[in-house]
Image (tube, rainbow, N blue to C red):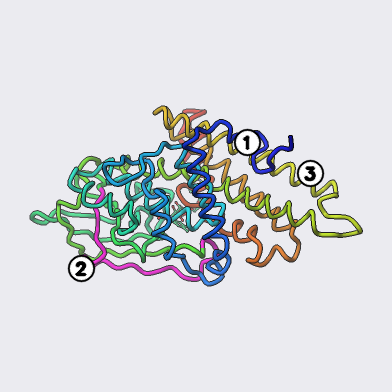
């Protein structure tokens, strides 16, 4: 029996029936609704917001949170497969879903009051309320402890001042999970978009994640009621806990990008006739294709085991760092090499590899750069902090 080039090791056979059904549903959505429009969206620098209701209807938003809050109550492997299939379409759509789910709904669920959960989560799962996550500041994202945005108590309220940079969903968000220094350490606040003194400015001229909204956020004496402070966490462990959730999903996403590039380069190289034979008949093309399949297979197994550890409550942040580093590096290298195999045709958005390669420049940078994750693994091995 012929093997599936997208899944040489039949990793799919390790999935439960429910996990396969989730993957198939999101794969169908990507094939039918994303792929026909996404090249144009990227060209135009436009996030396809019209797809949000359909994404929500698939149960993708906050997918792992409990049904009592309007969410799908899926396991972590299913969430990973969602990320993989969305990113097979475009990293921008996966970024939208990651931010909404792992960086906004998760902190409300994990650190919020019961009232906050009931107020926000059902509407966020339904895509009626969009969130963004404000951690990074203009002076250096890799060192979030050096946070300048601050909040001080004023009567029963808090007053926020500062700014955030590179914030996904910023201009389409109804709420911001904003992290700020306080006298009691870093705390999270739900800032609503119409609070006086809050503003968002979209970052233009991006060459990466063009089908995604990225913004700078400004807090100029924004008054936030105590009811909007996330009560159950203080310190950097709050935002870092969210990032671990999101990075877990990001380990799966680039597998989708890489599969899209392999698929496209396979098809193209079998049809492209040069020197009287298909490019795919040359040894150098086959070595490249085989090497991509090898790297994709390793990444699939890495993320699946990570997901099983997460579902068993045993996943460690260092393991997430290793997989984020490995899988982003795997995908960006494959996307660049696939672009090359397509020759001149590879430089337009009619084919996906250059779009994926450019997107992955962001994916390998955000949520901890490659260097940051290498240093996390190095610290684990040596016991020495080299940051
Ligand atoms: C498209 C996009 C979307 C994003 N979305 C969000 C979001 O929704 N919310 C949010 O809060 N942030 C978001 N970010 C920010 C992202 O997380 C940061 O860009 C990232 O953490 C890196 O921070 P920086 O850009 O300030 O780079 P810097 O931290 O200034 O890093 C510059 C360079 O220094 C290297 N470096 C850092 N530390 C060390 C060290 N100890 N030793 C050696 N080298 C080191 C880095 O690897 C990098 O190469 C987004 C970024 C992008 C590009």
Query: Between tags 2 and 1, which lies in front?
Result: 1
Are discs 2 and 3 less than 8 Å apart at CB?
no
Point out the tag, 3 or 1, that comes first from the N-terminus.
3
Location of residue 272 in the rendering, given as x and y in whole percent from the top left corner: 81, 59
**Residue 284 belongs to the span the image colors magenta:** no
Disc 2 residue: CB within 8 Å of ligand 1: no
Residue 283's spot in the image, x, y percent?
A: 85, 46
User: Which secondary structure lies at badge 3?
Assistant: helix
Secondary structure of the residue carrying numbered label 2: loop
Vertical comparison of 121 with 300: above or below: below
For the N terminus, which image quadrant?
Answer: top right
| Residue at screen point 36% across, 39% down | 73
| Residue of label 1 | 298
Residue position marked by numbered label 2 in the rendering:
196
Q: For label 3, count other residues whose C-alpha is less than 10 Å away and answer few (under 14), some (14-19) or many (20+).
A: few
Q: Position of residue 271 (x, y in %)?
A: 80, 57
> To which residue does mark 3 refer?
287
Magenta stretch? 188-209
Residue in the foreground of this view, choosing between 257 and 205: 257
In x, y percent, where is residue 112?
Answer: 23, 44
- Judging from the image, what secondary structure is the residue with disc 1 in? helix
> In the depicted view, which residue is nearer to us: 368 or 35?
35
Q: CA distance from mark 3 to mark 1?
A: 17 Å
Mark 2 or mark 3, whichever is nearer to me: 3
């Amino acid at each position: 029996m012929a093997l599936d080039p997208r899944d040489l090791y039949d990793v799919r056979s390790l999935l439960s029936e429910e996990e396969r059904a989730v993957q198939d549903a999101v794969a169908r959505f990507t094939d039918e609704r994303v792929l026909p429009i996404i090249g144009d969206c990227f060209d135009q620098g436009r996030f396809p917001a019209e797809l949000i209701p359909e994404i929500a209807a698939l149960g993708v938003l906050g997918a792992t949170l409990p049904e009592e809050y309007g969410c799908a109550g899926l396991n972590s492997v299913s969430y990973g497969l969602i990320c993989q299939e969305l990113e097979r379409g475009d990293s921008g759509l996966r970024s939208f879903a990651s931010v909404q789910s792992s960086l906004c709904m998760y902190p409300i669920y994990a650190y919020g009051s019961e009232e906050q959960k009931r107020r926000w989560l059902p509407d966020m799962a339904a895509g009626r309320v969009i969130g963004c996550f404000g951690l990074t500041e203009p002076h250096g994202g890799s060192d979030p402890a050096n946070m300048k945005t601050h909040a001080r108590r004023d009567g029963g309220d808090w007053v926020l001042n500062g700014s955030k940079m590179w914030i996904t969903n910023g201009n389409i968000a109804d709420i911001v999970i904003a992290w700020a220094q306080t006298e009691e350490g870093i705390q999270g606040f739900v800032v609503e978009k119409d609070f006086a003194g809050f503003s968002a400015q979209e970052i233009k001229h991006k060459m990466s994640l063009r089908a995604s909204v990225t913004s700078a956020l400004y807090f100029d004496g924004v008054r936030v009621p105590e009811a909007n402070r996330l009560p159950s966490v203080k310190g950097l462990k709050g935002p870092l806990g969210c990032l671990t959730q999101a990075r877990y999903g990001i380990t799966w996403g680039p597998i989708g990008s890489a599969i899209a590039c392999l698929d496209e380069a396979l098809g193209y190289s079998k049809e492209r006739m040069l020197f009287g034979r298909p490019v795919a008949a040359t040894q150098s093309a086959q070595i490249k294709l085989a090497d991509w399949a090898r790297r994709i297979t390793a990444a699939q197994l890495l993320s699946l085991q990570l997901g099983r550890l997460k579902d068993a409550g045993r996943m460690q942040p260092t393991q997430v760092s290793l997989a984020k580093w490995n899988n982003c590096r795997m995908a960006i290298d494959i996307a660049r090499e696939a672009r090359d195999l397509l020759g001149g045709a590879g430089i337009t958005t009619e084919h996906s590899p250059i779009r994926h390669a450019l997107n992955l420049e962001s994916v390998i940078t955000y949520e901890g750069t490659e260097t940051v994750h290498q240093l996390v693994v190095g610290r684990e091995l040596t016991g020495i902090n080299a940051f």
